[in-house]
Image (cartoon, rainbow, N blue to C red):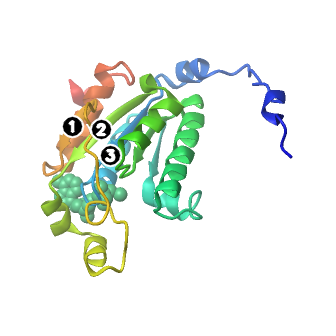
Amino acid sequence: MHDNFRNNIIWQKNTITRIKRENKNGHKSILVWLTGLSGSGKSSIANVVEAMLFKHGVNTYLLDGDNIRLGLCSDLSFSLVDRQENIRRLGEVSKIMLDSGILVLASVISPYKCHRQLIFDIVGKNNCFEVFVDTPISICRKRDSKGLYKKADSGEIRDFTGVQSIYETPEAPDLILDGTLPLKKNAEKIIKKLYNKNIIPKFKSME
Ligand SMILES: Nc1ncnc2c1ncn2[C@@H]1O[C@H](COP(=O)(O)OP(=O)(O)O)[C@@H](O)[C@H]1O
Ligand SMILES: [Mg+2]
């Protein structure tokens, strides 16, 4: 039996704190969570944002939903229970990375409101900036860069978001991006918000 083993685990306070790391870095850490349909442009936009931040000396990491599913979460399916566990692990990893002073970008379909809420609950809403990449499904289907809509239509993939499985549109995201606009334009919108929220310093190119 497991008993109440959790009662016997006590948080260890470390000397080097998140604030110390942020001060050393010269920027704050936050989780930029990009949600949207498959093919909406989450990974592409996050990749451009990260490249811009990296160029200006911001310590970043991009957690891409697909990459995480090939490693940390490779044991999980797309059932509701496994999708939730996938999100929980992403939340816990993000929380550690935030504590390490890194500005984390996450590009994850995360179709369910309750799962996005789980992320906010794990990392704290103040630590999370929700970006909805709003791209009509007709455009996502036309892009179909990985051929997944085609596979879902033929039944080769089941539980595919937007086909057999729903996407719940965020009600009050911090930012809505029109996913049909040029990548750079959308990336700049995120960078600007991060500056306005006092997360990153002003870059010369913003002046
Ligand atoms: N304006 C645009 N913004 C983002 N992606 C675009 C745009 N126009 C075309 N694409 C293409 O759409 C495809 C899907 O983007 P991706 O970032 O993989 O989406 P997601 O990560 O949301 O599944 C990519 O091949 C990308 O190059
Ligand atoms: Mg992607």
Quarter assignment of residue 99: top right
Q: Tell whether label 2 touches label 1 (CB within 8 Å).
A: yes
Q: Nearer the viewer, residue 109 or 113?
A: 113
Number of other residues with Cα within 10 Å of mark 2, as a class: few under 14, some 14 to 19, many 20 or more: many
177 with respect to 54 (left or right)? left
**Dot 2 corresponds to which residue?**
131
| Residue 96 position within the rendered picture, expressed as x and y whole percent measured from the top left | 60, 35
Q: Is residue 168 left or right of residue 121?
A: left
Q: What x and y, as percent, mark residue 85?
A: 55, 51
Report the residue at 34% width, 43% height from top: 34
Of residues 119 and 82, which is closer to you in this image? 82
Image quadrant containing the C terminus: top left
* Amino acid type of the residue tagged 3 in the rendering: Thr
* Residue at (23% x, 69% y) in the render: 144
Query: How far separated are the C-alphas under marks 1 and 2?
Result: 6 Å
The residue that appears at 82% across and 34% down in the rendered structure is 4
Residue tagged 3: 35
Pointer 1 residue: 176
Examine the rendered structure and indicate whether residue 25 appears above or below residue 137.
above
Q: CA distance from mark 2 to mark 3?
A: 6 Å
Say if residue 107 shows up in the picture: yes
In the displayed structure, does residue 83 sit left or right of residue 205?
right
| Rendered image quadrant of residue 23 | top right
| Dot placed on the residue nearer the N-terminal end, 2 or 3 | 3
Q: Residue at x 59, y 32 (%)?
A: 100
As measured in the structure, the alpha-carbon distance from the residue carrying label 3 to the one carrying label 1 is: 10 Å
Q: Quick one: label 3 or label 1, which is nearer the N terminus?
A: 3
Nearest the eye: 107 or 25: 107
